[in-house]
Every structure is written in structure tokens, then in C-alpha cells.
Image (cartoon, rainbow, N blue to C red):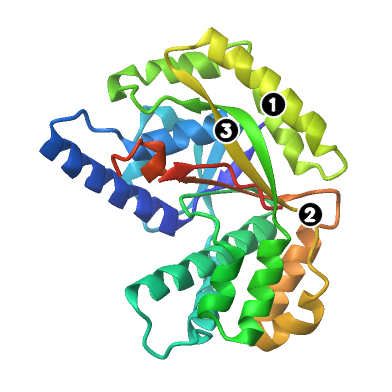
Amino acid sequence: MKRTAIVTPSSLGALAAYRTVIKDISAVLGDPAIDVARLFFAVMIQSGLDRFGVADEPTSDVLNSSLLTDRVCPIDYSRVADTLRDVREAIVRSSKSAEQSRDEQHVLYGLAGFVEDLYIAAEYKRPVATVLEMPAVEDASNVLRDDMAIVIEALLKAVRTIDVQAPVARFDVQESDMKAFRAVMASDVFEPDVGSQALFEIVSRPTGGVVEAVAVSAKSLVRAFPDTIDLRKTLVHGIESVPTILDSTIGKAFGAVAKPIANALTSALEKDRRLLVYSFWPTSYLGGQIGQSSSNCGE
């Protein structure tokens, strides 16, 4: 089963920035530099995503990797660009503060990114792979006026979190060893893991059984490739239905842009599907060198 995930321009830009920061820190510390962009895509591939849809412009050098040969495909981003801009502007305009602090701006843009990723996943009916961390529910009420906070909180509360034992790329594998990842992907034990991960997209499949299947496949991969793969707890966040409160609140909060958001979510969720947003943020994952990793499946 071939699965394509969308990687947004903002995520590609963030990956480029993370890579530069980590390279600079590694040079100061005298440690080997970790290519976080390559690690990001390795983690996503091992989470069952086969191809990555990206906007034609702007191009990004984080995609220049042998790991991504025949795995990157262009998508028509123009169909969502105006809506994404309007979503971000609506959320920023809903700030409680006329002049936000740096921390408040960070929270606002995190909330906007969360809604944007859900909209993209719904509009294209494909998973999104992002470097954004899932916001906390209380973030909305902390920085947003009530009309917008109610909508964002409803979406965040609709996210169901599942702990999964998943195979994750070891961060200490050097760039020259990326052939090890290709060996993993070509192995007989990799395909069952991909199939198990794909079942998270289907609402009618009980998540408990899917978690067990993913764990069995993951342990098989780790046993087969102990020098390349680690077994780690990964979070899967899933949205299965549009919160009913949105019917009466989304219009007031988002204005004209509410209709395309609501229509996309309703259409994407009506046929036994979850919206999937796989998220990886690198600092804590890299053991303090600079995030944390998780697969966010918001459907």
C-alpha cells in the first residue's frame, strides 16, 4: 500500500533551520552533525509513508537526499494558499493582546499551524508530515478571544492520543550509513509494518488491535536491524469526526474562510477515515542537542 503525505513549505523551512542550528552547535561541541531533515524523512518512511507531496515553489535543499529518490512528488498548492493565509490571519487577529510577546506569538503560530495542517490533510485527503508540535488545549484560551478559542479547543479536544511502540531511526546513524535505511525498506519485515501503520486511517478498525499489530511489526524490524532502528514510544493523534459545536461557532470565528474549512473536514471524515498528521520535532528526540518525536494522526 503506497501512502503519500504532504510536507508543507513551513515544515521544509523549519527543517532547514533546524539542520543549520544543529550543524552549528555540533561544530562548537566537536560532535558529529546529525542531518535532522534526513532523519525526519527516515522516521516518516518508517511510519509507513511512502511518498511526500510538496509545493512546486519554493524549492528546498532538504529534499536533496538519496533517501528521497523517487519519493517526492509535486502538488498543486495554489488551491489552498489563499485559505491558509486567511486561516492564519484570522487566528492572529483573534489574539487577546494587541501586541504579543514572543512567547504569545509562538503559541499563536502553533495554533494556526495545527488548523492549517488539519485543513490541508482534509482538503487533499492525505496525511500531513509536519515538524509542528501538537498544541495544548489550554493554549487556545490563554491567547485567543473566546469566539476563536471555542473553535480551536473543540478541534484539539477531538484529537485522540494513542501510545504506540514504533520503529524509529537511530539518530546516531551517520549520513554515510543511509544505505542501512534502504536495506530496512527493502526487507521482508518492513512491508507488514507499513501495512499495520496504514490501519490507523480506518475508523472502523479498533485501535487496540492496530496498536498490537504495529508493536509486533516494530519489534520484528528492531530485531532485524538493531544497529539502525530503535523501538520508541510514538504518539498517534486521531480525529474521527467534526465536533458538532463547530456548526454554530466556526462561522463567527473564521468568517468567510469558515466554509472551505468545514466543507473539507466534513468531506474527508465521512467515509470511515481519520485525518492523519504525523509530527516530528527534533529537540528532545536528539537527546538535548537541540525536540521530541511523535506521529500525530489527526484524521
Residue 35 in sight here: yes
**Could you say where residue 198 lies in the image, as x and y percent from the top left?**
71, 34
Instruction: Give how far apart the Cα atoms at labels 3 and 1 are.
Output: 11 Å
- Describe residue 259's horizontal placement relative to residue 133 as left or right: right
Mark 2 vs mark 1, CA separation in Å: 20 Å
What type is the residue that disc 1 sits on? Val
Q: Nearer the viewer, mark 3 or mark 2?
A: 3
**SS of the residue under disc 3:** strand
Up-down relation of residue 187 to residue 288 (above or below): above
Give the mark nearer the N terminus: 2 vs 1. Answer: 1
Which mark, by number, is residue 58?
Answer: none
Q: Which mark is residue 233?
A: 3
**Is disc 2 placed on a helix, strand or loop?**
loop
Task: Quickly name the residue at label 2.
Answer: 240
Disc 3 or 2, which lies upstream in sequence?
Answer: 3
Left or right: where 286 falls relative to 195:
left
Please tell me which residue lies in front, 177 or 214: 214
Which residue is at 33% across, 17% downward? Answer: 177
Q: Residues within 10 Å of mark 2 (few under 14, many from 20)?
A: many
Q: Is residue 127 above or below residue 252?
A: above
* SS at mark 1 in the image: helix
The quarter holding residue 35 reads top left
The residue lying toward the viewer, choosing from 127 and 242, is: 242
Is residue 59 something one can see in this rendering? no
In the figure, 133 relative to 256: above or below? Answer: above
> CA–CA distance between discs 3 and 2?
22 Å
Residue position marked by numbered label 1 in the rendering = 214
Amino acid on which disc 3 is placed: Lys
Name the amino acid type tagged 2. Glu
Instruction: Work out which quarter of the rendered image holds the N terminus and state it.
Output: top right
- Measured as percent of width and height from the top left, residue 23 is found at 21, 40
